[in-house]
Image: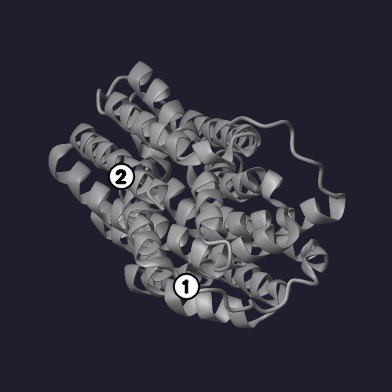
Amino acid sequence: MTVGAPPRLGHRTWLAVGAVALTATVGVLPGFAVGALAAFVEPDLRVSRPALGLAMSVFYAATALGSPVAKRIAARLPAAWVLAAAALTASATMLAVSQVDGEGLLIAVLAVGGFANGLVQPVAGRLIAVKVHGGRRSLAAGLVGAALGAGPLIAGLLVALVAVPHGWRAAMIAGAVVALLPLTLLRHVRGVGAAVPGQPKTGRVGGVLVLWGAAAALSAVGNNAVATYFVQLGTHAGMSTSLSGNLLSLSAFLAIAVRLGAGVLTDRAPARLPAVITAMMACGAVGLALIATGTSVGFLAGAVLAFTAGWGWTGLLLAATIRLLPGRTENAGHTVQSGLYTGAAVAPFSFGALSSAYGFGAAALAGAVAGVVAAALLAAGARLAGRG
């Protein structure tokens, strides 16, 4: 049932949420930056598209595979310490990437950055549960989800404003400086200590988490591939590198607006969160199908859908999982993160390999199919949750 507007939160609470969101942005930035700069990196390092895709997959795989360890670290330390470590490691990762001269070192550096990226979402779930009341949790989680969308936005700006005139290495150095920005807000996160153990989850809830995690992984495959290879997809559709970079930033900006708007609306009817997420995943699949047409119009329309709807559900899924696990907030962030980054790990290499062998259209169509399956799994999990 739809309810009235939830009560407001104080500005200190939003600054704390903003600190987590900004850390989420810079934590994922190394992976998106390498993808956005692929057209510059490949010839300079003399690596193939599948090889560079493998390097980016390692970044996301390190986040997904390291998530259980990162969850335990994040649960035992003060939130501000964990977020500082994540931001500093992201900065160091981008600085190191700017100096690499081969594929092997690039993979090693991105693996370290990927693991540190895994520290953010468990802290996000805990902070939202501690500092944000139930009536504003979808908006707060939407802000954190929007932060992930800001990663491609910044990556696109690095391409258009730095890489084109000064080269990709200078763009990575600029990204390393940007990654230090969260440190200016971490004082607002004080007071969020180590997590308090909650009640163990039941079998039904465990089944819901498995279905939702799988849905997140499958939906992330296609949408992450679009975000990672956006510039190359744009040039394939007949656009210039600079224009593609600007469109990447614009699409990411639209994604941020959608995530925040969806958070505001679903706070008024939190029970509808799973239905909204299912619809967004389905729309993302339609966007990927449009990109598969290979036309400039199809690319523009598909990119908007894939970014806004297809990527707009991440914060809402975090909010829905927190609602499902009221006493296990670090598990909520862990579930979303594991699914999201498992799909993100598969995306760069698989999309790179498929597009090299069969073309960008076939690769985008495969992502669309994965998105349809994701929507079905999310709906199945929602039905299972409703039986409790």
Image-quadrant location for residue 293: top left
Q: Position of residue 10 (x, y in %)?
A: 86, 50
Task: Relative to 215, say whether 45 is above or below.
Answer: below
Q: Position of residue 90 (x, y in %)?
A: 58, 67
Task: Relative to 325, say whether 6 is above or below.
Answer: above
Q: Is residue 366 left or right of residue 46?
A: left
Q: Secondary structure at mark 2?
A: helix
Query: 177 or 285: which is nearer to us?
Result: 285
The kind of residue tagged 1 is Phe
The residue sitting at the left extreme is 357
Mark 1–mark 2 Cα distance, whole angstroms, equals 31 Å
Task: Relative to 118, say whether 226 is above or below.
Answer: above
Q: Is residue 153 visible?
A: yes
Q: Is residue 181 visible?
A: no
Q: How many neighbours does mark 1 have within 10 angstroms: few (below 14), some (14-19), or many (20 or more)? A: many
Q: How many neighbours does mark 2 have within 10 angstroms: few (below 14), some (14-19), or many (20 or more)? A: some
Q: Earlier in the sequence, mark 1 or mark 2?
A: 1
Q: Quadrant of the N terminus?
A: top right
The kind of residue tagged 2 is Ala
Q: Residue at x 27, y 55 (%)?
A: 349
Q: Residue at x 64, y 74 (%)?
A: 82
Q: Which residue is mark 1?
A: 115
Q: Position of residue 153 (x, y in %)?
A: 57, 41
Q: Position of residue 312 (x, y in %)?
A: 50, 38
Foreground label between 1 and 2: 2
Q: Residue at x 42, y 50 (%)?
A: 35
Q: Which residue is mark 2?
A: 380
Q: Is residue 90 left or right of residue 11?
A: left
Query: 310 or 272: which is nearer to us?
Result: 272
Q: Is residue 366 left or right of residue 147?
A: left
Q: Are the residues at dot 1 and dot 2 in contact (C-beta closer than 8 Å)?
A: no
